[in-house]
Image: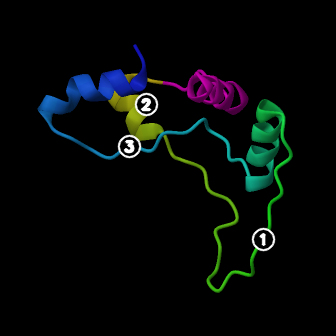
Amino acid sequence: MYLIEKILHNFPNGYNFYNVGYGRSYNLNQVADLLARLLGNKIKIQFAKSTIPDISDMRADITEVSKAFNWRPTIEISKGLRLIVEDLSN
């Protein structure tokens, strides 16, 4: 059963907010490179000067969702993005 199915199945008992991630962080360039390869296109990223401090690294703490649903991520980012691209292409 997928995590979203587990969460929706539990929904009548209340709700909560959960962080969902894979246990490591990826920067914008890494994600853009993965998507470019999957789409067969080049992606040009233009960075603008930030007026507020940017968060340079962030990783989702999946402790609560892991405990609540006995869940661990099984699909790494490149496969997950590929599945999304394939689904949106159909």
Q: Local crowd at mark 3 within 10 Å, few (<14), some, or many (≥20)?
A: some
Tag 3: residue type? Tyr
Distance (Cα) linking label 3 and label 1: 30 Å
Q: Where is residue 42 in the image (x, y as percent from the top left)?
A: 86, 46
Q: Mark 1 points at which residue?
A: 47
Q: Which of marks 2 and 1 is nearer the N terminus?
A: 1
Mark number, residue 7: none
Mark number, residue 18: 3
Which mark is nearer the camera, 2 or 1? 1
Q: In which quarter of the image is residue 18?
A: top left
In this view, the residue in front, 66 or 82, is 82
Residue 75 lies in the magenta stretch = yes
Q: Determine the residue positioned at 78% across, 38% down.
A: 34
Tag 1: residue type? Phe
In this view, the residue in front, 62 or 76, is 76
Q: Which residue lies furthest to the bottom in this view?
A: 51
Tag 2: residue type? Ser
Q: What stretch is highlighted in magenta?
A: 72-90
Q: Mark 2 points at which residue?
A: 66
Q: Local crowd at mark 2 within 10 Å, few (<14), some, or many (≥20)?
A: some
Badge 1 marks a residue whose secondary structure is loop
Q: Residue furthest top?
A: 1
From the viewer's perspective, is 83 left or right of 7?
right
Q: Determine the residue positioned at 62% across, 56% down.
A: 58
Q: Which of marks 3 and 1 is nearer the N terminus?
A: 3
Distance (Cα) linking label 3 and label 2: 9 Å
Badge 2 marks a residue whose secondary structure is helix
